[in-house]
Amino acid sequence: MCERRMGSKADKAVFTVTGTTLLTFLIASRVGSIWGLYPNVLIAAALFIYCIRQVDEDASLLSNSSIFGLAMTLIYLPMDWLFSRKVGLIFYLRSDFLASVTTPVGVILNWVVFATLAAYCYQRFEMIFRVRFAGKAGDPQVGFVGIGVLAATATGIGAAFGSVVIYGLGASHLWVWNAAQVDQMPQIASVPVFVPVSFLLTFLLCPYFFGGVGKAKDASGSRGYQHVGVAGIRCGIFMGALQFFSFLLFYVWK
């Protein structure tokens, strides 16, 4: 199935949005304007909607990933409110449309973009690895598990690295980390170390969030994947809980 290699319209859209996201936060780190985040959201929405309208498997992946991203962000929002409003771990320097909302709307919408990109990468990696390696596995069950773990590992590493880059670029211009001045909190590029660690560990569990890994296909050809909305909810809950308990660990030891 060579047609499943990288290079579809959805793949190109994801690559493009990844690039515009990095460029957007690089510019924001120089300008310090929250309004500069909105062009990236508009570009992502336009490209994703265009690709989703295409009738192919990759468009379906992108559509599912968008649902995942929206669900994960909505579930994670209360934790960010706790960190910013009650704990003082992060302080946002700019507000946009809703000044009374702790987290700027532009930041929230870009979170949806980030989560969508991560979910697409996981599903796409799994598809590619399945084509390349599943046939070589002696036991299909073991093969599917290994493929899911491999795809999740690649996604987790990418998400962890991306979190350091994005949160690091926004530091001191869009937000301030550790506003509560918690001592003994190790950082990477001004980002608390538990942030990339939580991204890594969260997306390592993608096979659990999405389900279906290690299951044989049924008569309809499905492996029983979890609904992407449920997967997003699981992911948001786990990331929020992991970050909260990680913060408590450092806070107790301060």
Image (cartoon, rainbow, N blue to C red):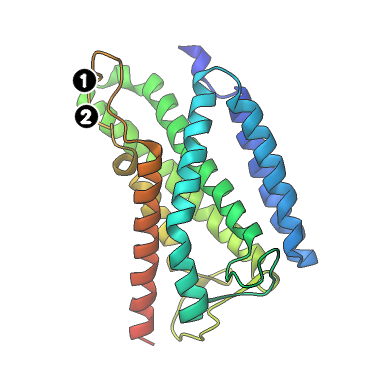
Q: Classify the position of the C terminus by image quarter.
A: bottom left
Q: Are marks 2 and 1 in contact (CB under 8 Å)?
A: yes
Q: Nearer the viewer, residue 154 or 12?
A: 12
Q: Residues within 10 Å of mark 2 (few under 14, many from 20)?
A: some
Q: Position of residue 129 (x, y in %)?
A: 40, 27
Q: Residue at x 41, y 54 (%)?
A: 200
Disc count in the image?
2
Determine if residue 89 is in view: no
Q: Residue at x 36, y 47 (%)?
A: 204
Amino acid, disc 2: Val
Q: Residue at x 49, y 50 (%)?
A: 159
Q: Residue at x 40, y 54 (%)?
A: 236
Measured in 3D between alpha carbons, the distance from the residue under mark 2 to the one under mark 1, in whole angstroms, is 8 Å
**Placement of 229 over or under 194, stated as above or below:** above
Determine if residue 159 is in view: yes
Q: Position of residue 131 (x, y in %)?
A: 40, 19
- Tell me which corner region of the image, top left, top right, bottom left or bottom right, holds residue 123: top left
Amino acid, disc 1: Gly
> Tag on residue 142?
2
> Tag on residue 138?
1
Q: Nearer the viewer, residue 22 or 143?
A: 22
Q: Classify the position of the N terminus by image quarter.
A: top left
> Tag on residue 11?
none
**Placement of 202 over or under 104, stated as above or below:** above
Q: Position of residue 96 (x, y in %)?
A: 70, 65
